[in-house]
Structure formats: structure tokens, C-alpha cells
Image (spheres, rainbow, N blue to C red):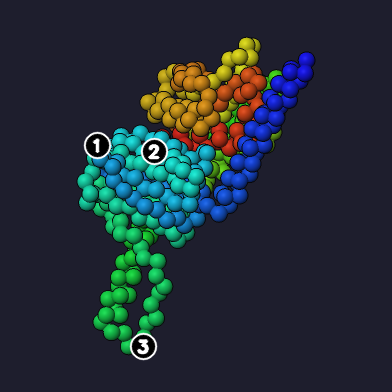
Amino acid sequence: MRRIFLLVAVVLVSVLGITFAAHSAEAAFSDRAKEMAKITGVRIGKTDGNVRIVIDSDRPVSYQQSVLANPTRIVVDVQNAWIAPEAKKNTAVDSPFVSGVRVAQFDATTVRIVVETSVGKGDYKVFSLDSGKPRIVMDFGGSPAGNVTKPPRDTEPAVIPSLPSEADEDEEEEEEQDARAKDQIDRDLDAITGLKGRKITIDPGHGGSDSGAIGPTGIMEKSVTLRVSRELKRLLEAEGATVILTRTGDTEVSEKGASATSVEELQARCDVANKAKADIFLSIHADAFTNREVKGTTAYYYTQGTKQSKRLADCVRTALIDSIGTIDRGTQTCNFYVVKHTDMPAILVEISFISNPDEEKMMNSAEGVKKIAQGIADGIADYFG
């Protein structure tokens, strides 16, 4: 009996020690991260003659670059930095210049970016922009649309004497050229996601008297879809998109409210997108099934829908699964009213199963909502990119 007691005591001490160590490590990292740059995202834009990769950071960074051979890879090590969990880690690129981009935490203080490329030494540039939103920019191939990619100098404006010399005039002209180059780079970077100027309608499923599916602990689908849609709106608008929500609160969309028929309510949602002349329409839902073990993510588009609708569904489904790690249930055709009666590429996304206890918990957490919204936003960016 004494031996059993001692064995249990040893096990408990070991478990408590591991738990304490894990909490201590987490706290230590949290303290270190306050002094480190946070890599918040990776954006990729391409044209026929160029691939531009942008690494976004929350503060200015320093980096070192190197080249690895067989196959050729350009490596950029961002120092004193950590990568946000929601940032996209691995991206395949369909281009003759770049085939893939990988981003990972190389060690405790270094984020490593690896670009698989076929270009030679003189056909790529790497530079940083510290003014405004800090970024590392990597250009492969020619300059986008023939634009100048010379990084602007971060110098103080020169004091112009009362009688400028020819050298002063040359310096002033060079500064003006640098300013124009900087403006052009900023415009190019803003356009990479393809979201700037886009009009997107997001439809939070259910609402008001219609709760939608209800999870094992009572979480309602209508609440999940609204929280995700609000966060998604915030993310898309930060990238320059115009976002219209079919509902902004726990209400029906139809003017008839709870007395509207199902068709009237669904048509009201379509009307929001059609009247706004939106570029795309996404209806956000949470799936449910009698078997609580069933789980996963599905995207739907109209059976007789366009290729653009299918591509949108594929992009969003893939990026969402990458973000939240759910089982892939594929892109499927459907006859759902809201994707059938909209005038633009339209999809319905079933985030995951609210009837599954684990997925219900994920969808009801603040972290889960952020990851879901980020995944959908990444998919939309991929579609327009």
C-alpha cells in the first residue's frame, strides 16, 4: 500500500512539475514577445512578369538574407521577431518565378522566410519599408507593371538655401523621385491582396426568431455566425474592401421581421447583395447532425453556378481549414436559395459542426472566432489575388 502511495505521489509531482514548467515557459515567451516584432501576415501578388511578396510586421525589423542551392531558395531571417499564429505559413505560387513561400519560427527570436525560386541573382530584390506600416518586400522577376522598385530613403528633408546650387537642385529632384517611388510602392502593396475597392456582402446565417442549429451546451448558430461576420468585416475593411452585412444584430433581415416567410427572409438577404452590386456574396453558417461525432468544414455553391463561384468556394474552404484545422468535407454543389438568387459569385460556408462538442467550443471562443474570420478573409484574398 505504501508503495502505491509513493508511486501516486511521484506521478502527481511529475504532472504538476510539467504543468508548472509549461505555464512558466508560456509566461516567459509572453514577456519576451513584448520586446519582439510580430510578423502579422504574408501577402503575395503576381503579374505576368513579377511576383511580389510582402511580410507585414507590427514594428520595424532587421533581417539577413542568404541563398541556398539545389534547389534555389532565397532565405530571409527576420531577427528579434515571432510569427502570429493566424499568419499564413505555407503558400504555393503558380508562377515561373516563384513556386512556393514558407514562413516559420526558426528559433526563439528568428522568423525565417524561404522562397523557392528559379530566378538568378540579379532578378530579385529584398528591401524593407519602415515608415507607415513596417514591411519587408521581396520582388522576383521584373518590376510590377514596369514600376520603379527602388526603396525610398529614410532621410530628413534637406534645408534649401536661398540660392540653390545645381547640386542642391539635383538632390531635390532625387528626393522627389524617391517620394514618387515610395508612393508607387505603397500603391502596389495595397493592391496585392486585390481587396482594395472590392464590395463584399457577408450574410450571417439565421438571426432574430430563427436561432439556427443549437450546440450541446446551448450555443446558437445565429450568435456564432454574427460574431464571425463582424470580425470578418473588420479584417476585410482593414484591407480596403467595402463590406455590407445583411444583418448587424440579432434580427431578421426582412422588413416583415418574424412574420416573414422563409422565402421572404432569404430573398431579403439576396436583395441586400443585389442592390449593393456586390462583387461576391458569402453566407456564413454552422453545420449540425444528429451524430455528435461528425465534424468538418464544407463550402457550397449553386449547382448551376459559375466557375467563379466554385473557385471562391474552393479558396475560402481551403484557407479556412488551414486556419482552424478542421476536417475537409470538400466543396459541394447545392440548391440553397441565397446562392441561387444572387447576381454575383456566391457561396455558403459551413464553418464546422456546432453539434460536435469540440467544434462548438472552438466556434464559441474568442480565439476561434478570430481564426475562423482570418481563414475566410485569407480565402477571399486568394480569390481576388
Which numbered circle lies on residue 95? none
* Residue extending furthest toward the top: 291
Compared with residue 62, is residue 327 higher up or lower down, i.e. above or below?
above
* Residue extending furthest toward the front: 2
* Location of residue 175 in the rendering, given as x and y in whole percent from the top left corner: 34, 70
Secondary element type, mark 1: loop
Q: Which quadrant, please, contains the N terminus?
A: top right
Q: Of the residues tagged 2 and 1, which is closer to the observer?
A: 1
Q: Of the residues tagged 3 and 1, which is closer to the observer?
A: 1
Give whichever of discs 2 and 1 has the lower sequence position.
1
Q: Residue at x 42, y 40 (%)?
A: 103
Q: Is residue 358 visible?
A: yes
For mark 2, what is the residue? 102
For mark 3, what is the residue? 162
Q: Amino acid at mark 1?
A: Asn
User: Neighbour class for label 1 at 10 Å: few (<14), some, many (≥20)?
Assistant: few
Secondary element type, mark 2: strand
